[in-house]
Structure formats: C-alpha cells, structure tokens
Amino acid sequence: MKFNHIEYKKPFFKIGKELNNYLIKYSRSLEIPLQYDDLLRYSNLIPLENEKGTPTLWNRVIYNSNEMDDLYTKLVDIYRLLISDGSKISHLTVDGIDFCSYGNSKPFRIKILNQLNDNYDYYYIKRADASRVYGLELEHHFSPNKINYIYFQETLIEEHIVGIPGDQFIEEVQSKKIEINKVRLSKEFAKFNQRCFIRLLGDMRAYNYVIVVTQDFDQIQYRVRAIDFDQQSYEGRSRMYLPQFYKENSFYVQLIQSAISLETIEQYQNEEKSLLKKRYFNEKYQIDYLIDVMKKDRISNDSNIKNLKMELGKFHGSSKFKNCKSMGEILEANIHTMLGL
C-alpha cells in the first residue's frame, strides 16, 4: 500500500467578510482583551522535555516581569469567556505559557490552574486561518464531538481536546503499557476514516488526532478525534483526505486488516454515512449557510481545485464535480454524493 506525505506548509487564508458575518451570527466571534501578536513579545524561550527527558516541539515562554501581571489577567479573562459567560472567577491563574513553532498555526498553549484544588486545564491561542475555522465548524456539525472556540480579528482561541495522541497511543500499545480491544478500535478508526473523507479533512497523520478511551461497564470504548484542522479542503489529492493512506497510520490500517472483514468495514462506513446524514438534516440551515460562504471563499489554489475535482469525479463516477470552481463547491458535491442528498 502506498502512503501519502505532505512536504510543505499550507499558506494562511484570512477570514473574509462573509465568514466573519457567519461567525458573528452564530456567536463564535467575541471580543477578547489581547491578540496573538501580543504573545510574541516574549523575552526568552526554554525548550521543554517530556517525562522521558526527550526534547519536545514546545518551549516555555518567558516574559518581562513588568508585563506578566497584565498579561496573565487577560489570559484568565479569555479562558473565562471560552468556558463560560466570562463571569469573574478569582481563584484561577496562569501556571505557564508554551509556544510551538512547528506547523502552520504556531500555537501558544496556556495552562490555567485552579488554586482551590490544584486542578488545571489548557487552551490554545493561534493566528486565525479561514481553513482552520471551516474545519472547526465542520467538525462541530458532522462529528460526534462539539467544538468550542472563539474568533476575534486575527486571533483564534481553541479549547484543549482531551485524549491520547494517536502516535503516542501506538507506542503505548506496542510497548504493552495498555491493552486494546482490537475490534472496537478498528471500528472507530474505520468510521473516522470515512468521516474525514466525506467532509474533506486532510493531513490526519497520527499526531493530528487523539484516541479517547472510555471505560463502559466491563468494556472499553474508543473515539478518534481530530485535533488539527489546518488542512480542511486544501489538498489536491483525494487520498490525502483518507487517513488510511498516511504511513504514520499504518498501525491502525494493519490492525483493521487483521481484526475485521471487508464486509464489516463496509457496514461501519454505511453506519457513519447514516449518522452524518442525520446530523446534516438536524442542522441543515446552518451547514448550508456555512458551505455557501465557503463556496465563495478562496482556501486553496487553482491547481489543487482542478486536480481534486477530477479525482473525486472519477472516484465517484459522477459529473457533479466537473463544473466546481472552488473547494467549497467540491465539498458540497462530495457531501451530497456520499450521503445521497
């Protein structure tokens, strides 16, 4: 089996007027007290290591002492807006700010500490990108997971998605630190694979999604959740929207091949289509509005649009894709074709 790889970074696409209006209408746009660029005024970076002492992609950010009080107050205010109505909570504080220069979004990770019980939570501050916003919205409507985020001007605030990163999960299984139910995990990855393809979410390599493990009576349930949405409807190759074709996911592909039959895979794919169809009709007005905005937006290049519509038209044996002029139109045609709308 051949695997795909992405050799370059996707360009940023600014939030246009129509997408901004959509975000305002559905209360995704809220005024916040600082912007992404404000966090770039740090004085030093300290590389962070994991519990094994191995360097990570994250750096602890150090700011001048005369700026920290004001900065921390604003970061706590943003957290309160993200998780509630912004009401004052006096026992919250910032326990650390980390920065990752890898990838498209170059996020800041904010650690919020509850001083009453030492419990902590994270959220992320990123530079706003239209592709990512479309990805977040489509995930919110088409997946079994609800997504919480705030957009304002040039900045995107995202909640932390809890789970074991897909690559770390593989390591823990292979080192026998955790045992898995092969059939249940295979089922969830097969459904995740189908869901990504229908809504054209690309670059789902193992470190761009998490495995959520839940104990249910005497059994273990799994859910595969995307955590990176930068490659929403950007790539020109149809295989890049199928997680099964990334070499980083070969563990899950081999697991499926050994644990369940092709007939069972098809059953799970059909189940996922039915669920997505129900979700579409439950929120049809908002989803149609979002896709109409996306159809007029530019979130990829002409070469990718031309190649993807050709490949999907051939894959589906359909002429619906022939006259598509944008990624939004291709997405709409793919959703309608695969869900029978």
Image (cartoon, rainbow, N blue to C red):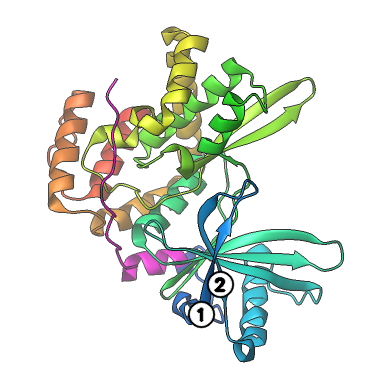
Residue at 37% in and 39% down: 199
Q: Are marks 2 and 1 in contact (CB under 8 Å)?
A: yes
Q: CA separation, marks 2 and 1? A: 6 Å
| 253 inside magenta stretch | no
Expressed as whole percent of the image width and height from the top left, the position of residue 297 reads: 26, 59
Residue nearest the observer in this picture, 44 or 194: 44
Q: Amino acid at mark 1?
A: Tyr
Residue nearest the observer in this picture, 79 or 309: 79
- Quadrant placement of the C terminus: top left
Prevailing secondary structure of the magenta residues: loop
Q: Is 244 left or right of 296, judged from the image as shown?
A: right
Q: Is residue 197 among what the camera can see?
A: yes
SS assignment at label 1: loop
SS assignment at label 2: strand
Residue that label 1 marks: 42
Residue nearest the observer in this picture, 230 or 173: 173
Q: Amino acid at mark 2?
A: Val
Rendered image: mark on residue 61? 2
For the magenta stretch, what is the residue range?
1-23
Expressed as whole percent of the image width and height from the top left, the position of residue 183 reads: 58, 15
| 7 inside magenta stretch | yes
Q: Is residue 274 among what the camera can see?
A: no
Rendered image: mark on residue 331? none
Mark 1 burial class by Cα count in 10 Å: few <14, some 14-19, many 20+: few
Expressed as whole percent of the image width and height from the top left, the position of residue 104 reads: 36, 58
Expressed as whole percent of the image width and height from the top left, the position of residue 307 reads: 14, 39
